[in-house]
């Protein structure tokens, strides 16, 4: 059986695409987790993770979820 060798540019492109997809999916969840962790007990702005996601979408829009990314 002959082994197929994938060229370096193909590996770089596929790795880059996988990284972009991963960051795009995970970043809103990480942003939500960070906002929940940073709120103070007496000034709780969010009740749950879903509440934080919904409030962020309403107040900052879709691209607000990726504000710190760029």
Image (cartoon, rainbow, N blue to C red):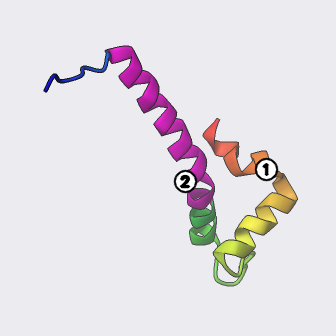
Q: Earlier in the sequence, mark 2 or mark 1?
A: 2
Q: Is residue 20 above or below residue 12?
A: below
Residue 14 in the magenta stretch? The answer is yes
Please report the bounds of the magenta region as a residue range: 8-31
Residue receiving disc 2: 26
* Residue 3 occupies quadrant: top left
- Decide: is 48 above or below 65: below
> Which secondary structure is most common in the magenta stretch?
helix
Q: 28 left or right of 63?
A: left
Q: Which mark is residue 39?
A: none
Which corner quadrant of the image does residue 8 belong to? top left
Provide the residue designation for mark 1.
62
- Residue 53 locus on image (x, y percent): 72, 65
Magenta stretch contains residue 12 = yes
Q: CA distance from mark 2 to mark 1?
A: 14 Å
Which of the 4 quarters of the picture holds residue 1?
top left
The residue at the point 56 percent across, 58 percent down is 30
- Which quadrant holds the C terminus? top right
């Amino acid at each position: 059986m002959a082994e197929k060798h994938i060229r370096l540019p193909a590996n770089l492109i596929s790795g880059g695409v996988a990284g972009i997809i991963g960051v795009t999916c995970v970043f809103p969840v990480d942003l939500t987790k960070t906002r929940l962790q940073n709120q103070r007990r007496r000034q709780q702005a969010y009740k749950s993770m879903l509440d934080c996601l919904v409030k962020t979408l309403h107040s900052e829009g879709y691209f607000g979820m990726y504000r710190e990314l760029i």
